[in-house]
Amino acid sequence: MKYKWLLIFVIVIMLTPMTVSAHQHTPIEKLDNISDEALQMIKFQRYDDGKKLLSYFSEQFTDMNKEYPFTMDELRIITVSHDEAMEAASSTNMDHEERVQKLTKFRLAVDAIATSHQPLWTEMKNQIMTAFQEARAAASTGDSEHFHSNFNTFMSLYNVIYPSMKIDVSAENIQKIDARINFIDEYRSEVVSNVKSQEELEGLEMDLKNLFDNMDEDEADPSLWWVIISTGSIIILTLSYVGFRKYQGEKNMRKNRSSVNKDE
């Protein structure tokens, strides 16, 4: 019985520090939370509150920039997306949908820096791929109207995740996708009427699938794997120790019984 309690005690000791650290927010996580709150305020049309949160974000970001090792690209991306978000919160004539789009772009960019795995922008995969696949289907049937409509939707969604992509994806991959998109956008009429030009749509679809598939790999947090491996190891060691002690106890018991029998 005492070995069982020893096992429980060891497991609790192993997990307690990790549980405590999991609830501690780093400075970048604080910025991430502020950006999320600003987005929620804009969604609820509380534009003044959203603007105040964006101003607070700017203050915290400036202070954090003195210590946190942001790259030049990260600084530029966050600054530009924050300026667009502030413009959206301050505007008196911008459509609500456009405001939300700009705040979403900003929110995703901050999350891309704060998150080391499963960034939020990858959750837009289904929306983006659906819009693109519908555009491609329309092109294959020569339906120009639906092609333009769906490709515009795709472009709009792609624009939302673009800053985040530039943080998480290599410049080479982004340039490859951009080249295909620019070609299709510039030669839309030809893409709809020319089967050969539609091969660019097929190539772009493959590039987009690869983009999201690569981001889906290694989704587990490395720290989680460390917890699993460490906990599993300590459990195995503890069970081995318990088993050894039990074996020793039974061995000694048999030895004592044997001695008693000989004495008799």
Image (cartoon, rainbow, N blue to C red):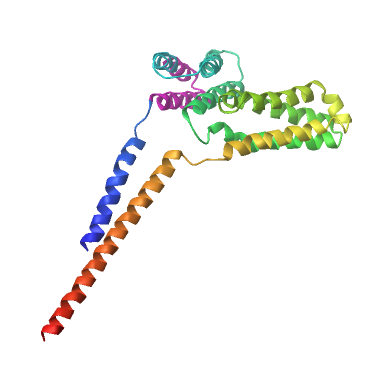
Query: How many labels were placed on the picture?
Result: 0
Check the image and name the residue furthest to the bottom: 264
Question: Taking 139 as reference, is 9 above or below it?
Answer: below
Is residue 146 at least partly visible in the picture? no
Q: Residue at x 54, y 22 (%)?
A: 106
Q: Residue at x 49, y 42 (%)?
A: 220
Residue 253 location (% of width, % of height): 19, 74
Q: The C terminus is located in which quarter? A: bottom left
Q: Is residue 40 magenta?
A: yes
Given the current orientation, which residue lies at the most extreme left position?
A: 263
**Which residue is nearer to you in this view: 236 or 179?**
236
Q: Quadrant of the rendered structure where residue 153 is?
A: top right
Residue in the foreground of this view, choosing between 146 and 236: 236
> Magenta: predominant secondary structure element?
helix
Query: Which range of residues does the magenta coloring cover?
Result: 27-56
User: Quick check: 91 above or below 187?
Assistant: above
Q: Position of residue 47 (x, y in %)?
A: 50, 19
Question: In this orientation, does residue 222 appear?
Answer: yes
| Image quarter hosting the N terminus | bottom left
Which of the pair 65/186 is nearer the observer? 65
Going by the image, does 175 lie left or right of 196? left
Pinpoint residue 178: horizontal percent, then vertical percent. 70, 24
Is 79 within the magenta? Answer: no
The x, y position of residue 20, in whole percent, is 31, 38
Furthest residue toward right: 194
With respect to residue 1, does 129 lie above or below?
above
Q: Residue at position x 69%, y 37% from top?
A: 130
Left or right of 74 on screen, residue 207: right
